[in-house]
Amino acid sequence: MTAYESRGIRSKDDKLFDTFIYIIAGMVLILVLYPLLFVVSASFSDPVHVIEGKVWLLPQGFTLEPYKHVFENDAIWQGYGNTLLYTLAGTLVNIILTVLAAYPLSQRDLPGRTFIMVLITITMFFSGGLIPTYLLIKSMGMINTVWAMILPGAISTYNLIVMRTFFQNGIPYELQESAWIDGASNFRLLLTIVIPLSTPILAVMVLFYGVGHWNAYFNAMIYLKDRELFPLQLILREILILNQSENMGLEGAGMTERVMMAESIKYSVIIISSLPVLALYPFVQKYFVQGVMIGSIKG
């Protein structure tokens, strides 16, 4: 530490560099934050102003009518409930299976663990393809069931590698050896020592898996037939497609009230569907950087 740093005095180059960093960070913040602010403003604006492009930052012609229509739409609430079920159940299955797979692979005395990891890593680059996967799901009787939204993606290879690396480098091996000397089994060691010390990586995995389930719609398009099982994202997709098709059909004939309301409902549904993820992130933010850095850089 230099004398200038010890007295809290910074050079002109340091101040110039800090200014440059703040400018870049501010520009990135604007680019990331503006789309969210626009969607929020559009959801509270008169649909006429939205269609005419008059909404830039603040709501124009404030109205709550789109949210009223959303709350009265049974299909949206049914999709919301389905998405909550898929997210909670799917994330629970993901965490349990990922931990049960990552912990043995992190142990030095597991025979052939390097070969097993090579086989697992290969799946990150090669897969069976859509048709073989569909035939497999169909042969297991999961078509048009809740399990089709949970089991096919039960373990993410990337998340498995990150968690395995965390167990290897974040949990002292000497601590595990002392537990074995005291007579603890591997399962007891996992429950009483490893998991309590793995809060950062578990929080990160919950966020990764939870957001993935919440935004999932492709599997629903492929494997689900009954509309009662559709997740919220698929309902939102239908609203967007319906809105676009109606706009094309009415081109040159004028905008109807239904089309204008659909435009506003589109933004209000986006806000409602994003709220749970936005509400979850602040609670796991303090673990996010710690868990990812420990799990991915070391090892």
Image (cartoon, rainbow, N blue to C red):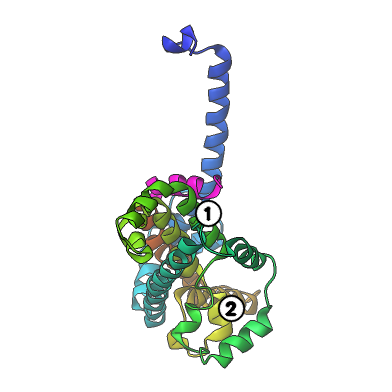
Q: Amino acid at mark 1?
A: Lys
Does the rendering let one see residue 51?
yes
Q: Is the C-beta separation of discs 2 and 1 under 8 Å? A: no
Q: Is residue 6 above or below residue 18?
A: above
Q: Which of these two is toward me, 202 or 265?
A: 202
User: Whole-percent x and y of residue 183?
Assistant: 31, 60
- Comparing labels 2 and 1, the label whose residue is closer to the camera: 2
User: Whole-percent x and y of residue 70?
Assistant: 38, 73
Residue 44: quarter of image: bottom left
Q: Which of these two is toward me, 189 or 62?
A: 189
User: Whole-percent x and y of residue 149?
Assistant: 49, 79
How many other residues sit within 10 Å of disc 1, few (<14), some (14-19) or many (≥20)?
Answer: some
Q: How many marks?
A: 2
Residue 293 belongs to magenta span? yes
How many other residues sit within 10 Å of disc 2, few (<14), some (14-19) or many (≥20)?
Answer: some
Magenta-colored span: 284-299
At mark 1, the secondary structure is loop
Question: Left or right of 203: which side holds 108?
Answer: right
The residue at the far top in this view is 3
Q: Which of these two is toward me, 234 or 219?
A: 219
Q: Amino acid at mark 2?
A: Glu
Query: Which residue is the site of mark 2?
Result: 246
Residue 231 belongs to magenta span? no
Query: Which residue is the site of mark 1?
Result: 54
Distance from the alpha carbon under mark 2 to that under mark 1? 21 Å
Does the rendering let one see residue 171?
no
Residue at figure coordinates x 69%, y 65% from the top left:
125
Residue at figure coordinates x 48%, y 63% from the top left:
104
At mark 2, the secondary structure is helix
Residue at figure coordinates x 55%, y 85% from the top left:
223
User: Whole-percent x and y of residue 119?
Assistant: 64, 67
